[in-house]
Image (tube, grey):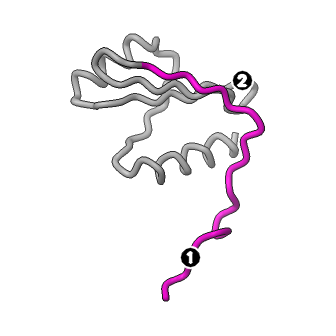
């Protein structure tokens, strides 16, 4: 499960205004409706199988378009690697 949290943390740095919510067992249609009512512009859903992320679904609200990305050989960077220090 740590890999999923690492991926979510990485996505939150890529999308700085993003908010993380656990999906639980909510249907995607309910998530889209909920996000639209609250003024969200996009929803990103990370699908997992056996605690490994296997796809990414990006939907622009309220009516699309939607993109589906399959994730293979996903490696999250090690914290601190490749970061620039202040100069």
Badge 2 element: strand
Q: Residues within 10 Å of mark 2 (few under 14, many from 20)?
A: few
Residue 76 is labelled as none
Q: Residues within 10 Å of mark 1 (few under 14, many from 20)?
A: few
Instruction: Report which quarter residue 20 is drawn in.
Output: top left
Q: Does the magenta portion include 85?
A: yes
Question: In this picture, is 73 found above or below 69?
Answer: below
Q: Position of residue 47 (x, y in %)?
A: 61, 25
Q: Position of residue 32 (x, y in %)?
A: 35, 18
Residue shown at the point (52%, 16%) measured from the top left? 25
Question: In this picture, is 85 found above or below 60?
Answer: below
Q: Position of residue 63 (x, y in %)?
A: 30, 15
Residue 84 is labelled as 1
Residue shown at the point (66%, 26%) measured from the top left? 70
Disc 2 marks which residue?
Answer: 49
Residue found farthest to the bottom = 87
Magenta range is 66-87
Badge 1 element: loop
Residue shown at the point (39%, 10%) measured from the top left? 29
Query: Alpha carbon of mark 2 to alpha carbon of mark 1: how far?
Result: 34 Å
- Closer mark to the observer between disc 2 and disc 1: 1
């Amino acid at each position: 499960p740590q890999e999923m949290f690492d991926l979510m943390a990485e996505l939150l740095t890529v999308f700085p205004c993003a908010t993380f919510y656990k999906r639980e067992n909510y249907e995607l249609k309910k998530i889209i409706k909920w996000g639209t009512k609250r003024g969200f512009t996009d929803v990103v859903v990370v699908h997992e199988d056996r605690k490994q992320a296997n796809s990414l679904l990006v939907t622009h609200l309220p009516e699309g378009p939607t993109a589906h990305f399959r994730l293979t050989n996903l490696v999250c960077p090690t914290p601190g690697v490749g970061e620039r220090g202040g100069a």
